[in-house]
């Protein structure tokens, strides 16, 4: 049975990607970062999400692969994405099909120019 964890910006599946199809797997995970393109990403931020994903998966080594554990990993990664947004490492994609400030309002430079 294929397990999955779905948050707003992180999706994890017990499957591998073959072409455009997800093929169930008992021992491999696939992560989809921001599948709706709601955020503007840079290479470094994406690499950090993958690195954190690997670290979290490794921390569950030897434990049963359960939907609960996948949800915990997904939630941790969602918090990481939120921290990137709050630090200005990534930004909202204003050209997204549905702009949704689910992680807080965009940060605006408060400098006043007279």
Image: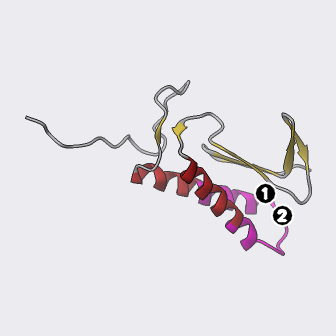
Foreground pick, 69 / 16:
16
Q: Which residues are magenta?
A: 55-77
- Residue at the left extreme, as displayed: 114
Q: Callout 2: helix, strand or loop?
A: loop
Q: How many neighbours does mark 2 have within 10 angstroms: few (below 14), some (14-19), or many (20 or more)?
A: some
64 displayed left or right of 94: right
Q: Are marks 2 and 1 in contact (CB under 8 Å)?
A: no
| Rendering coords of residue 48 (x, y %) | 59, 58
| Rendering coords of residue 4 (x, y %) | 78, 49
Residue 65 disc label: 2
Q: How many neighbours does mark 1 have within 10 angstroms: few (below 14), some (14-19), or many (20 or more)?
A: some
Can residue 64 be found in the magenta stretch?
Answer: yes
Q: Residue at x 91, y 43 (%)?
A: 23
Q: Compute the Cα span from label 2 to label 1.
A: 7 Å
Tell me the residue that label 1 is attached to. 67
Residue 56 disc label: none
- Residue at the bottom extreme, as displayed: 62
Above-or-below relation of 99 to 13: above
């Amino acid at each position: 049975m294929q397990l999955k964890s779905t948050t707003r910006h992180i999706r994890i599946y017990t499957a591998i990607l073959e072409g455009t199809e997800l093929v169930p797997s008992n021992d491999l995970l696939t992560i989809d970062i921001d599948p709706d393109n709601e955020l503007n990403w840079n290479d470094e931020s994406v690499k950090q999400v993958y690195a954190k994903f690997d670290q979290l998966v490794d921390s569950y080594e030897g434990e049963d692969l359960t939907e609960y554990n996948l949800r915990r990993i997904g939630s941790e990664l969602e918090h990481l994405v939120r921290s990137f947004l709050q630090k200005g490492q990534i930004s909202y994609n204003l050209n997204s099909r549905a702009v949704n400030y689910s992680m807080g309002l965009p940060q605006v430079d408060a400098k006043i120019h007279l």
